[in-house]
Image (tube, grey):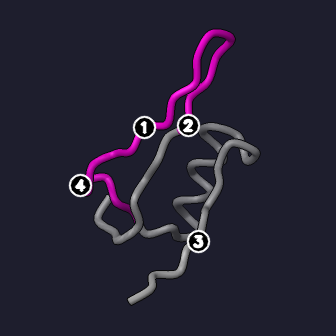
Amino acid sequence: KAGGCPVWLSYSNARATADIVLGEEWSVRPTDELLSQLSALAGAEQVKVLYTLKTR
């Protein structure tokens, strides 16, 4: 928590898929420590950081 990057969860099973956008209170700073912890929890192949450029 306590960051400027929004968090999305992508869920899928045999019957359905869903993208879940978490609220602003769940925003994070994608530090090496956080990414390492998420990878340990969910598996490295399940953790992705997507970068986009903001345009004015």
Task: Identify the element where label 4 is drawn.
Answer: helix
Between the C-alphas of marks 4 and 1, the distance is 14 Å
Residue toward you, 19 or 41: 19
Expressed as whole percent of the image width and height from the top left, the position of residue 21 reads 39, 44
Residue for point 46% across, 47% down: 8
Numbered disc 3: secondary structure: loop
Which amino acid type corresponds to the residue marked 4 in the rendered image? Glu
Vertical relation: 14 (above or below) 49: above
What residue range appears in magenta?
10-28
Disc 3 marks a residue whose amino acid type is: Tyr
Report the residue marked by disc 4.
25
Discs 1, 2 touching: Cβ within 8 Å: yes
Is there CB contact under 8 Å for labels 4 and 1? no
Is residue 42 rendered to the left or right of residue 55? right
First of labels 4, 2 by sequence position: 2
* Residue topped by disc 3: 51
> Looking at the image, is mark 1 or mark 2 earlier in the sequence?
2
Answer left or right for 24 relative to 36.
left
Q: Earlier in the sequence, mark 3 or mark 1?
A: 1
Q: Which residue is drawn at 29% across and 65% down?
A: 2
Spatial CA distance of label 1 from label 2 is 6 Å
Q: Earlier in the sequence, mark 4 or mark 1?
A: 1
Task: Count neighbours of disc 2 (C-alpha within 10 A) and say few if under 14, some if 14 to 19, many if 20 or more.
Answer: few
Q: How far apart are marks 2 and 3 (CA)?
A: 16 Å
Q: Are marks 2 and 3 in contact (CB under 8 Å)?
A: no
CA–CA distance between discs 3 and 1? 18 Å
- Name the image quarter holding the C terminus: bottom left
Would you name the residue on which mark 2 appears? Answer: 10
Instruction: Give the CA separation, mark 4 to mark 3.
Output: 20 Å
Circle 1 SS class: strand
Q: Mark 1 points at which residue?
A: 20
